[in-house]
Image: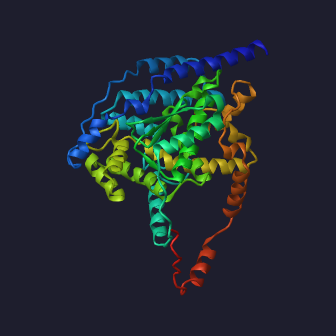
Amino acid sequence: MSDATQREHDRIKTVARLLHEGCRPLRVLSALAWPPEVKAAFLASGGQTLPEVGYTPFDPTPTIEAVREARCLIVPVTTIDLWLERQAQSIEQAARMLAAVGTSGFFEHGRLLYGEPSAPLRYLPVKPLELAHQVQETIAQLSRIHFDIAPPAYHSAAEVAERLEVAVKEHFGDQAPRIDLVDQLSANALATSKAIRIRRDARFTDRDYIQLLHHEAHVHVATSINGKAQVDLPILADGHPGTTRTQEGLAVYAELISGSIELDRLRRLADRVIAIQMAIEGADFIEVYRYFLEQTDQPDQSFESARRVFRGGLITGGAPFTKDVVYLTGLLSIDYVIRACFAAGRADCLHLMFCGKLDLFALPALCELYEMGLCRAPRFLPPWISDPRHLLAMLTFTVFANRLDIEPLVAVVTKLLDSAPVVRMPSAS
């Protein structure tokens, strides 16, 4: 290796280290957490009193200084430097967002990081709000079809934890995360690289368990562990807001490809986008809570769904947390990119998506960094990537089917069955 090449390698590693150091204080969801007594007080009031929430002040200075130092070494003209500059911009924006918790400024920074329901997506001709309404309309159409689905069998958190512990040990070996049962958790389950926490009083179906394994373990845990193995590019271990859309998109896509996603899950994702728009337009916590309550008739779940919208923002409305916009848009982006990589003969890029916490726009830079020896191949991959037979078959069919115009066939089938009586099959139970 020449001296010039070594200097370039050292420069890139230094920038990645500085950005990693700047990212360390950014614990977004922890900073926005609500204590359990907030929910208890709200539900005790019958959902009539706005929650009172305070946040620990966040000092963005260490992050901003680390980013400033990194930017002194970034020349944003090459593919790699443009990627590093995007990381720097997202990290600084996230620090400023956390410094503005509880104010309208929190929303202003958040909408730049995560997007907002009414803002069109880049490169895709759709708005998240339009996508959410399309999901709701499609589900409403399907509800008119009389599928007689047997009620699911439910399993306790302890049973799911036992099954999950076996599965993660088989997949991750000595790096498998702990499975912890906890009394307080805002969701049924949450994952880090070291542990998957499950709320003790949660109940799960078999499909829920598969979803948990593929979403939390095979994506979130895997990309965390793979990122921590990137000794030359430690920024790949950091899940900052600039990577959220891709990470959550991959996780929901894993639910889809594993067959564990259900209509109720898609409805919840769509409802969150609509609720965020309600809050932007001025709806307060109680109004958004009642919207979710109309959908589920479950006060506890409705509170948690509303909390996701208002954490960090204004309880009285006008400035929500827009993170939940990314689930549907991230899923759409991942689906398009995976299909495009397949059609373009670049399936090699599918592995690179799991080398750490990254955004899809990082792929060209990571290809170069891999060739330079600075980016390591991911050790842990989801089963649908490490054994892609099902994925390849689905992609082949999808690419083929998308070239066909289905409308003439829909017209023929509609006419064919127009006078046919609706057939009611025996109960599945």
Up the image or down, 72 lies above or below 139; here it is above
Quadrant where the N terminus is found in the figure: top right
- Give the percent coordinates (x, y) of residue 197: 47, 36
Where does residue 330 sit, x and y in percent of width and height? 54, 46
Image coordinates of residue 425 in percent, x first then y, are 53, 77
Q: Position of residue 199 (x, y in %)?
A: 42, 40
Residue 70 lies in what quarter of the image? top right
Which quadrant holds residue 398?
Answer: bottom right
- Judge from the rendering whether residue 400 lies leftward or rightward of residue 216; answer left or right: right
Pick the front one: 382 or 12? 382
Q: Which residue is drawn at the image coordinates 64% and 28% (left, top)?
A: 174
Between 226 and 119, the one lying in front of the other is: 226
Residue pictured at 50% horizontal, 70% vertical: 148
Depicted 12 relative to depicted 404: above or below = above
Nearer to us in this view, 131 or 29: 29
| Quadrant of residue 80 within the rendered picture | top right
363 and 125: which is toward the camera: 363
